[in-house]
Image (cartoon, helix red, strand yellow):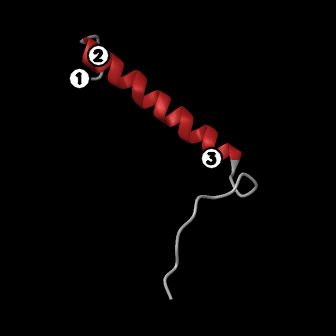
Amino acid sequence: MKTVALPASDKERIVLLDVLRGLAIFGILMVNKQIFSGRCCIC
């Protein structure tokens, strides 16, 4: 028997994890913006 993975329903989602993932992606975007603009203080 083959098991099929399905997306989680809205009731099963953990909102805090979605918020944390969004903040992490936003942080990565901001760092990339600084690096590619040439005003990076990290490099």
Q: Residue at x 24, y 12 (%)?
A: 38
**Is the C-beta separation of discs 2 and 1 under 8 Å?**
yes
- Is residue 8 placed above or below 16 in the rendered structure? below
Query: Quarter of the image holding residue 43?
Result: top left
**What residue lies at 33% left-to-right and 24% top-to-bottom?**
32
- Give me the C-alpha separation between circle 3 and circle 2: 29 Å
The residue that label 2 is drawn on is 40
Judge from the rendering whether residue 19 lies leftward or rightward of residue 28; answer left or right: right
User: Dots 1 and 3: beta carbons under 8 Å?
Assistant: no
Estimate how packed mark 3 is, as few (under 14), some (14 to 19) or many (20 or more) residues with alpha carbons within 10 Å: few
Q: Which residue is mark 3?
A: 17
User: CA–CA distance between discs 1 and 3?
Assistant: 30 Å
The residue closer to the viewer here, 19 or 41, is 19
Judge from the rendering whether residue 16 lies leftward or rightward of residue 5; answer left or right.
Answer: right
Q: Amino acid at mark 3?
A: Leu
Expressed as whole percent of the image width and height from the top left, the position of residue 34 reads: 33, 16
Task: Please give left or right for residue 10 compared with residue 19 in the image.
Answer: right
Q: Can you give x and y, in whole percent of width and height, for residue 20 in the image? A: 59, 40
**Amino acid type assigned to the residue bearing label 1 in the image:** Cys
Mark drawn on residue 43: 1
Q: Earlier in the sequence, mark 1 or mark 3?
A: 3
Q: Residue at x 63, y 38 (%)?
A: 19
Q: Is residue 14 above or below residue 34?
A: below
Q: Earlier in the sequence, mark 3 or mark 2?
A: 3
Left or right: 23 with respect to 39? right
